[in-house]
Image (cartoon, rainbow, N blue to C red):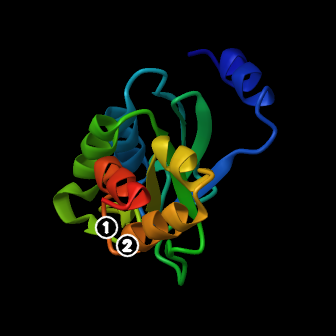
């Protein structure tokens, strides 16, 4: 992708999520692109110049796209900065199969399951893997059913649509 087409694509998106890594920006961006496929790709990689003699030639930033959304990964070096749950990426999943697939890929190789559809990947980045059906269930007219579904969700790690529906229906 040419620099002009990268700039053109990014100019359509006013805000870009910027992720700080110690030195795994390129590896992480490649991993995320492989997980989401489709409209996901590495757009551009920049390298440190001689201005940073100890880093010259190493990857500085990687601009990448996941499902049409632009991100930038930075190799910022070891600092007192790390990912935590105060920021997460929420993924709208069309089906339980998509939830299952993304959950497996993102928790692989050292990722950690969390409560209520949250997880941390092997880089420590927090994700919410959310089935689209959850919105339908939580906006249902049966308020007691919604409360049961929320109660069931609070006991889950990976969200299970069938379990949420059973709880909503009181089964």
- As drawn, which residue projects farthest toward the bottom? 80
Contact? badges 2 and 1 (CB < 8 Å): yes
- Circle 1 crowding by C-alpha within 10 Å: few under 14, some 14–19, many from 20: some
Q: Position of residue 153 (x, y in %)?
A: 40, 66
Residue at disc 2, secondary structure: loop
Q: What residue would you read off at disc 2?
A: 115
Q: Position of residue 163 (x, y in %)?
A: 30, 56
Q: Residue at x 73, y 25 (%)?
A: 7
**In this orientation, which residue lies closer to the viewer: 72 or 133?**
133
Residue at disc 1, secondary structure: loop
Q: Is residue 48 visible?
A: no
User: Is 107 displayed left or right of 55 in the figure?
Assistant: left
Q: Residue at x 58, y 57 (%)?
A: 142
Q: Residue at x 37, y 61 (%)?
A: 170
Question: Where on the picture, by quarter, is residue 98?
Answer: top left
Q: CA distance from mark 2 to mark 1?
A: 4 Å
Q: Which mark is residue 157?
A: 1
User: Is 43 displayed left or right of 119 in the figure?
Assistant: right
**In this orientation, which residue lies closer to the viewer: 125 or 44?**
125
Is 89 situated above or below 110?
Answer: above
**In this orientation, which residue lies closer to the viewer: 95 or 123?**
95
**In this orientation, which residue lies closer to the viewer: 121 or 42?**
121
Q: Earlier in the sequence, mark 2 or mark 1?
A: 2
Q: Which mark is residue 99?
A: none
Q: Position of residue 11 (x, y in %)?
A: 80, 28
Q: Is residue 65 visible?
A: yes
- Circle 2 crowding by C-alpha within 10 Å: few under 14, some 14–19, many from 20: some
Is 56 situated above or below 71?
Answer: below
- Quadrant housing the C terminus: bottom left
């Amino acid at each position: 992708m040419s620099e002009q087409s990268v700039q053109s694509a990014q100019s359509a998106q006013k805000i870009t999520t910027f992720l700080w890594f110690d030195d795994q920006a390129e590896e992480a961006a490649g991993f995320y692109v492989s997980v989401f496929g489709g409209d996901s790709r590495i757009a551009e990689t920049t390298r440190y110049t001689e201005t940073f003699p100890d880093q010259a030639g190493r990857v500085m930033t990687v601009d990448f796209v996941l499902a049409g959304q632009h991100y930038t990964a930075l190799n910022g070096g070891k600092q007192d900065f790390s990912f935590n749950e105060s920021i997460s990426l929420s993924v709208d999943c069309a089906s339980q199969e998509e939830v299952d697939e993304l959950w497996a890929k993102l928790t692989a190789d050292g990722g950690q399951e969390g409560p209520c559809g949250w997880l941390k990947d092997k880089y420590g980045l927090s994700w919410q893997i959310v089935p689209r059906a959850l919105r339908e269930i939580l906006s249902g007219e049966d308020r007691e059913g919604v409360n049961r579904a929320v109660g069931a969700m609070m006991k889950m790690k990976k969200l299970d649509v069938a379990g949420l529906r059973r709880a909503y229906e009181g089964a």
